[in-house]
Image (cartoon, rainbow, N blue to C red):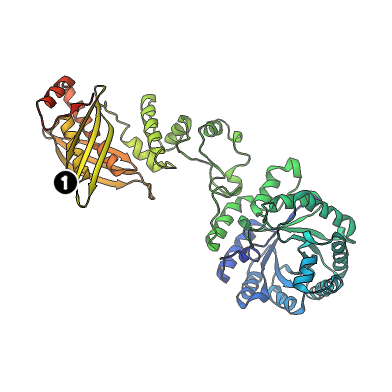
Amino acid sequence: MENRVYIFDTTLRDGEQSPGVNLNTKEKLEIAKQLAKLQVDVIEAGFPIASPGDFEAVRQIARTVQGPAIAGLARANPADIDRAWEAVRDAGRPRIHTFIATSPVHMHYKLRMQPQEVLKRAVEAVKRSRDYCEDVEFSAEDASRSDPDFLCEIFSAVVEAGATVINVPDTVGYAVPEEFAELIRKLRRGVRGIEKIVLSVHCHNDLGMAVANSLAAVTAGANQIECTVNGIGERAGNTALEEIVMAFYTRGDIFGLTTGIATDQIYPTSRMVSSLSGMVVQRNKAVVGSNAFAHESGIHQDGFLKERTTYEIMTPQTIGLPTSKLVLGKHSGRHAFRNRLEELGISLPDEEINRAFQAFKDLADKKKEVTDRDLEALVGGKIIAVPEVFRLDYFHIVSGNSTLPTATVRLVADERIFEEAACGNGPVDAVYKTIDRITGIQTTLEEYSLRAVTEGKDALGEVTVKIRDNGKIFTGRGTSTDVLEASAKAYVHALNKLVADWKILGRWPRPVQEIDQEGAAGGSRTGKAAG
């Protein structure tokens, strides 16, 4: 098929060469099985001569994994090629991938060989590989910095010697897209027999252009891309498999190309590789990053809720994610907030939505992301609202293991501000005694409990208090990332419930002037107007 691009996955070879990554045989086998589910065309399972462990991993994969071709890498010398064949020979579709450097800097300094010696070695390597199997790939290492005429010469020779795939690596990520595309076009014109073989590219990401270079190459005539899951690999990594595949999938109008990839396996494969390699996927990584299908901006969330395609060019389900994510944070709007509550099965009237939304905004200013458990805790105390006779406006606490805890609290009552201070046995006790002085209400604190309702250092704390008055119990709840603030809110909430009950019995409110008078008379539990 002329519009078919083959996906050659080198996660287990080039990807494992990432600094700090060391996969064992069992881990490599698990990844290889997942790559087969992903339906890549070729799995480069490793570099068999590199170590006994690498050899065993390649051999186990060749014997176990069905579907993709299984390739073993070999330098252009007999020992490497023999070892590679020994490792892949039991595969249903074995491939030997042999290579030698072709750039002037590599030939002169690394190989210490003349171009014709390199050509001779390449031809001998391909011929020896063909003695073992029909599928042989040849790579010209550092091709992007090689003389194009020499590339045409060496590629023509290895095709004649039996190579079925020739690979053009941008080994150090030096190329730019148009330059790399022009190299591919020149090879298409200058390599004899190229119409009979697969033309492959292998790009590194040193300048952040591995994916762009690979896409440019296929538009110029390449039909195999060598890549890794999550783009892992030497130095800055390789072409990212998921980005290539989804570029073809999403922009078929531009590329008109397809792959055989089962796209719904992209995300599971990404998670597995990240977990086993220990290489965390950055949050803003294209396609598979945790932010790739997440929306926090209120404008974006509103547009997305009205029509998904306003801010998503592909669906999360396409790559194996169940749904997009509306991240509730300080940039979120009322539409997304109400939508998330409905998803949680919480339905509130408009007035309560407004109150809950304001509480959400206050919390969002204190923590980056508000979770579902945060919302449930926030709304839990507001579904049955009580009038706020007293509202916490401000508190300040001085405390320590060798300091007498002292609290200053400011409450708003009847649109007037009241402020007092008091000491206590601890910071919470000091806050509660200060609130008692302001309100003049004498109750008994029956119960105080604190729990974390979310995870992490910025966890939302929920405080529940129970106060007793004339045999009745009133429960108050308060939530905040600051447990002292949550404690103050819970106590004020309970007092407001108590006052609401007094109103029903005709015992409240007392005029604010009465509070002022009591304060002037030196009432120990009464606050004074602050102005």
In the depicted structure, whether residue 22 falls above or below residue 418:
below
Report the residue at 53% width, 61% height from top: 278
Q: Secondary structure at mark 1?
A: loop
In the depicted structure, whether residue 517 falls above or below residue 341:
above
Bin the neighbour count of mark 1 within 10 Å (Cα to Cα): few under 14, some 14-19, many 20 and up.
Answer: few
In the depicted structure, whether residue 323 falls above or below residue 528:
below
In the depicted structure, whether residue 338 falls above or below residue 464:
above
Q: Nearer the viewer, residue 237 or 262?
A: 237
- Dividing the picture into quadrants, the one containing residue 25 is bottom right
Q: How many marks?
A: 1
Q: Measuring from the top left, give residue 112's x and y in whole percent.
A: 79, 74
For the C terminus, give its image quadrant.
top left
Left or right, 341 with reference to 12: left
Report the residue at 13% width, 35% height from top: 443
Q: Which residue is mark 1?
A: 425
Q: Nearer the viewer, residue 172 or 486?
A: 172
Left or right, 24 with reference to 416: right
Left or right, 88 with reference to 194: left
Q: Measuring from the top left, give residue 368's x and y in whole percent.
A: 44, 42
Answer yes or no: is residue 354 visible.
Answer: yes
Q: Measuring from the top left, give residue 272's x and y in whole percent.
A: 55, 59
Left or right, 275 with reference to 139: left
Amino acid tagged 1: Asn
Report the residue at 31% width, 39% height from top: 479
Q: Nearer the viewer, residue 523 or 465?
A: 523
Answer yes or no: is residue 138 visible.
Answer: no
Q: Measuring from the top left, give residue 429's x and y in whole percent.
A: 18, 42
